[in-house]
Amino acid sequence: MSTMTSNRVGQGFSLGSYRQLGRSGLRVSPLALGTMTFGSDWGWGADLDETRKIFNGYIERGGNFIDTANAYTNGTAEQMVGELARSRRDELVIATKYTMATRPGDPNSGGTSRKSMVRSVEGSLSRLQTDYIDLLYLHMWDSLSPAEEVLRAMDDLVRAGKVLYVGMSDVPAWQVSRMQAIAELRGWAPLIALEIPYNLIERTVERDLIPMAQAMGLGVVCWSPLAGGVLTGKYSRSDLETGGEGEASSRKQVATGNGFLTPRGLDIAEAVKDIAAELGTSPSRVALAWTLLNAAVTAPIVGARSLGQLEDNLESLDVQLDPAQQARLNEVSAIELGFPHDALRRLGLAI
């Protein structure tokens, strides 16, 4: 299991306490601003006025790490980021992703191929109103393109100055480690970041993905650190039933589809609420503070539909969990590591 440490939060950290991202010189804030809520195209996001408040609120607190993707809210998210970042572009680290399809019926408008990557980057550059992307992720591995094709295309974009750094998101650990080795051996742009889901409900990434990232020099960036809102305490047992209409239903479907809204997930959320009550803080802050205890984590991604939500999340940097509270959270959310991890641990050989 990945190393946990308690000396990274609750010690006066701020968004301006920048960290190096992986084995690179790029410095980013300890909380990234997610933009999947930028735009109402999917039925539950923020409009431009509220998005401006969220964006400016994050920047004014010292934040510099913006996370988006080519198809978030059908491209509206990138457009909003481009508009809001235009006057301060060089101060920001803007990360975007490719592989999500953008034209129904066109198999080459998505996927991991060179064609998909190059066209996606050109579209992102236009929507973001910039001539370079700080960090480009492969969004989802489709097992279709050879690893060498992906890596060489990424390296070409880096050499052309259109992309500065590259990373992976939602890719098997064995494939990422193999790709990193290929890039190093061939002198291509190395991978510096791994974006994966990580929260108290989803800890299976501790089996291989997080240890791999530590060994291979990739900073871990966590999506959905609040488990689709489940760890905020907003859901109850009645929400386990399907149905409903409108925005609330759409958000619930996202939490359910990602496997967060389950009886186990609600049990974990209750433990988070109990500890939040002890500390006089919010469940969201406790859940975010827990992810930052992992030494491999560079930055969880916080998404917000209002300035108030953002401000609440940012206060997680001041939350300090004592050893007993950490132990309670770890116990209620514990997972089986499986083979060979459990077998090695029994022999005292686990790493």
Image: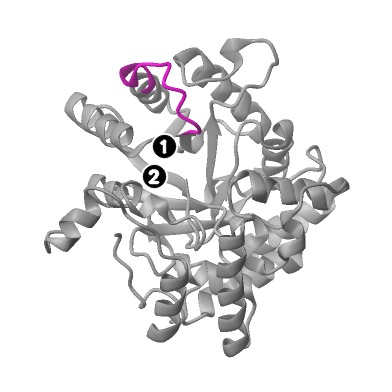
Q: Is residue 329 left or right of residue 6?
A: right
Is 317 or 49 nearer to us in this picture? 317
* Label 1 element class: strand
Q: Which residue is mark 1?
A: 168
In percent of width and height, residue 134 lies at 48, 40
For marks 2 and 1, give the CA distance.
6 Å
* Label 2 element class: strand
Q: Is residue 182 above or below residue 114?
A: below
Do the numbered discs 2 and 1 sit on residues whose CB atoms are within 8 Å? yes
Query: What is the crowding at mark 1: few (fewer than 14 residues within 10 Å), some, or many (at least 20)?
Result: many
Which image quadrant for residue 274? bottom right
Q: How is the image coloured?
A: one colour
Is 252 or 52 nearer to us in this picture? 252
Label 1 is placed on what type of residue?
Met
Is 84 or 192 nearer to us in this picture? 192
Which image quadrant for residue 334? bottom left
Identify the main secondary structure in magenta: loop
Of labels 2 and 1, earlier in sequence is: 1
Span shown in magenta: 138-150
- Residue ID at (59%, 54%): 260
Kindly tell me whether residue 43 is visible in this rendering.
Answer: yes
Q: Is residue 346 left or right of residue 242?
A: left
Q: Which residue is mark 2?
A: 193
Query: What is the crowding at mark 2: few (fewer than 14 residues within 10 Å), some, or many (at least 20)?
Result: many
Asked if residue 296 is among those painted magenta in the image, a careful observer would answer: no
Image quadrant holding the N terminus, namely: bottom left
